[in-house]
Image (cartoon, rainbow, N blue to C red):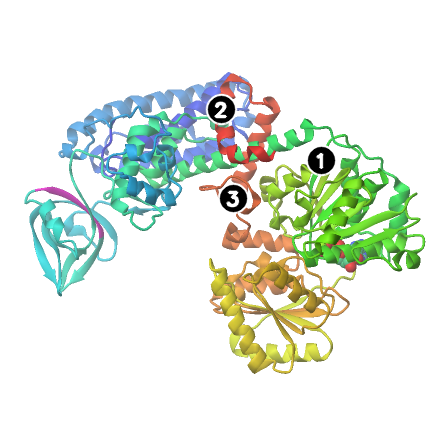
Amino acid sequence: MLALMPWVFPSLKQMMSIDSLRNVLELERQKRYTNKAVIGGLDKYLHNQARRIRQTLVLSLNEVKTKELMPQLLADFDELNLANSDYDSFSTAQREGWITSIFDWISKLETTKQENGSRIKSLDKSPTMTTKSHPKKKSEGLDSPITHIRGITPSIATKFAKLNVRTIHDLLYFFPRRYIDYSQRRFIAELKEGDEQTILATIWQARVATFGNKRGTEAIVGDETGNIRVVWFNQPYLARKFPTNTRVVISGTVGVFKGQKVFESPEWELLEDKELIHTGRLVPIYPLTQGLYPRQVRKWTKEAVDGWAWQVSDFLPSETRTRCQLLGLFDAITQIHYPDNQMLADEARERLAFDELFLLQLGVLARKRDWQESQPGNAFDIDQQVIDKLLHCLPFTLTHAQHRVLKEILADLKQPRAMSRLLQGEVGSGKTVIATLALLIAVANGYQGALMAPTEVLAEQHFDNICGYLSKASANPSSSLRAQRSNLRCYAGFLSRPLTIALLIGSLSNLEKEDLHHKINQGKIDIVIGTHALIQKEVEFSKLGLAVIDEQHRFGVLQRSALRQKGFNPHVLVMTATPIPRTMALTLYGDLDLSVIDELPPGRQVAKTSLLESQYREKAYNFLHRQVAAGRQAFIICPLIEESEWLEARAATTEYERLSREVFPDLKLGLLHGQLRSSEKEEVMRRFRSGQIDILVSTSVVEVGIDVPTASTILIEGADHFGLSQLHQFRGRVGRGKEQGYCILIPEKLPPEVKNRLRLMEKIHDGFALAEKDLELRGPGEFFGTHQSGLPDLKVAKLSNLRSLELARQEAITLFHHDPNLNKAENQLLRQQLSQVWSNYAEWS
Ligand code: ADP
Ligand code: MG
């Protein structure tokens, strides 16, 4: 292998884009020039690829030593004019001719490459800078513990375990966060202050030196253009590693001390018989934990890559790989650790990200199919009369969007396979009434329905709302309400028999719970509304036909499938107010079909939002005082403190005390934070809802769909720390009654970009538009991690990259279409990989 220093000659691995070009053209030839080799057509592909290839060629040209070798090739390449190709409009014969001429050019290039290679070798005056010894391929399997690597002791393995690295395979998939670019070699005379640079030099003298009262190492090194001083503080032992005349590579930033240039504590590496890993290249920076040092870790990842990466088999079907123009897996793993250049590092990341998304997609698609096909679902009859009865009694008519979504849901319920649908709709868009209609249909078909909410307060709220809807349509609402127990109600004359609806939450007495469990089991309850209590073992439905889950992001796949296992393969409707761009929703919840209520009921007012700089906070407090005096309530949201719910709770408590004492001594304040027990949280929310609290001081835990009609104002402190989507969720908490709602954003800091971002809140009131902006401006950070959703972790892929999400999804669907069970020979490796990645989740489906 020709592994020269990157600045000597751009590595021939750069020519990989040419390999990819060749593959694509070969495929196109096989497909008889039908322009089907790549998605989107050959022209688009060539346009992109031409840029890369040309870049590579130009890079080679710029190399002093090879100047005379490439110009003709470049001229020929330009003549082919790939960047402006018009393949699409060619006749088949023209296409064939043109592709042949590209092949001719490629073979010319290859010949030059070979000659060039040998020439470079002989030109190179420092043979020590090439890799002479081939890395030793290891035969132990990839599942071997990392202690198989020289120098990794059991105690170091424990430290790696903290990073979830246990096997060699894990280490290969332990990727750097970023790279430092030490690939720019300079002569000493050219060194510039402040830049990250690399020199190749000879040690003239190295000795232990004292800096202040600490010992360290000082060396004088030189090349043909000059000498420079290099110092390492605190590392006196280095002096011994640098005997005079040793060749060394030094990478770091150059400073100036007493008018002289100096390298201070740079990275260093002796120029031995090895490839450089700490200097002279793009140097990987790994995420580390205490007790692991960068140099060691680089040594070990290098050893893993050299010794074991060859064993990794590329599980992507080659057709997929070619069509998506992806690096091979071996190259991707090698390049993500020790890239030859930034372009290849990016391509490696692209490939590995694709793998993650593709496997994720295949997994969710398979799961959906399993759910739908393993057991037949229950086809419901849709009794339009039941629906009309409820609709006619409502004080409003459904919006177009609600009608559309209802139709989609009813169409699913008619099918003999279980519905799996995600219903997205802004806060206040009217999801509950849709859920109620679906539940009614289940009951009218003799099945039970369940609605699960993330908190007791929300469950109670749903219970009240749904009872409200039902009582309007009930034959004799006043009598049916009288003398009913609060958590169990019965509506006569609505269906051909009385309909029973119950609230099942953790705070009921054991006796009440047992009674409900019994009645649910006996089929004496038609609709149950509750919290997690619903998926507990004791709850056995007699005939569960539909499960509705509200506020998806607090529930994971796990809970969803627990509900499914409540029997009868029920239809499942998941509702969320968190706006997620479509592609992302399809990825995270690819097992669900998607319905969106993208319209608010008419006349719905939006919360007036304003950004207020912190020095005017008093104004906001005065406003709150006036609102409370007018009989309304308010929220004050405390700043987000990353990664410590405890600190956040403490800060909220301090703020609560300050506000109670100094700002609102005459008002009743409440405090809500994540460190409270859930019964305490529920209690605070209950008091707020019933008007016993005027102002609720809260951390971000208040976000989920709580409905307090008299809450008019929400003041958000540290607004700059929240994402737009989250702010929008907060703002949805106010103005839910008839009164105008207000949202006041007070940022901690307000640099221009934050100001611009927060100003969007004043202008945009569409949650989806805000979500897209959020992704664009801040990345996916705030969007729930896959952890919570019970999906495999994504290490490389970014959910914000909608283009790659879409690509992975398309490819997964295509593959699934052609080989749904991955039975074909060429898909066997993929099948294995898939079951490995999803193994932790298998028991859920
Ligand atoms: P979501 O759960 O989507 O946030 P809800 O179902 O709680 O919204 O509805 C919010 C409020 O709007 C409720 O008071 C509900 O009765 C009312 N509502 C629902 N649909 C309509 C409609 N089409 N027109 C007017 N009001 C509606
Ligand atoms: Mg709701």
**Of 311 and 561, the residue lying toward us:** 561
When the figure is inspected, residue 65 is found, relative to residue 552, above or below; the finding is above
Crowd band around label 1 with a 10 angstrom C-alpha radius: few (<14), some (14–19), many (20+): some
Q: The C terminus appears in which quarter of the rendering?
A: top right
**Of 415 and 140, the residue lying toward us:** 140
Look at the image and tell me whether residue 800 can be seen. Answer: no
Instruction: Determine the residue positioned at 78% across, 58% down.
Output: 464
Left or right: residue 111 versus residue 492 is left
Q: Which residue is mark 2?
A: 317
When the figure is inspected, residue 59 is found, relative to residue 605, above or below; the finding is above
Dot 1 or dot 3, earlier in sequence? 1
Amino acid type of disc 2? Answer: Pro
In the rendered image, residue 249 lying in the magenta stretch gets the answer yes
Asked if the residues shown at circle 1 and circle 2 are in contact, with their CB atoms under 8 angstroms apart, the answer is no
Q: Which residue is mark 3?
A: 801
- Report the Cα–Cα distance between label 2 and label 3: 23 Å
Instruction: Determine the residue positioned at 80% across, 52% down.
Output: 399
Percent x, y of residue 292: 29, 47
Q: Which residue is mark 1?
A: 567
Crowd band around label 2 with a 10 angstrom C-alpha radius: few (<14), some (14–19), many (20+): some
Magenta stretch secondary structure, dominant: strand
Left or right: residue 548 versus residue 150 is right
Q: Which residues are magenta?
A: 246-252
Percent x, y of residue 374: 67, 27
**Of 231 and 77, the residue lying toward us:** 231
Dot 2 or dot 3, earlier in sequence? 2
Amino acid type of disc 1? Answer: Gly
Instruction: Determine the residue positioned at 40% across, 40% down.
Output: 346
Percent x, y of residue 676: 57, 63
Q: The N terminus appears in which quarter of the rendering?
A: top left
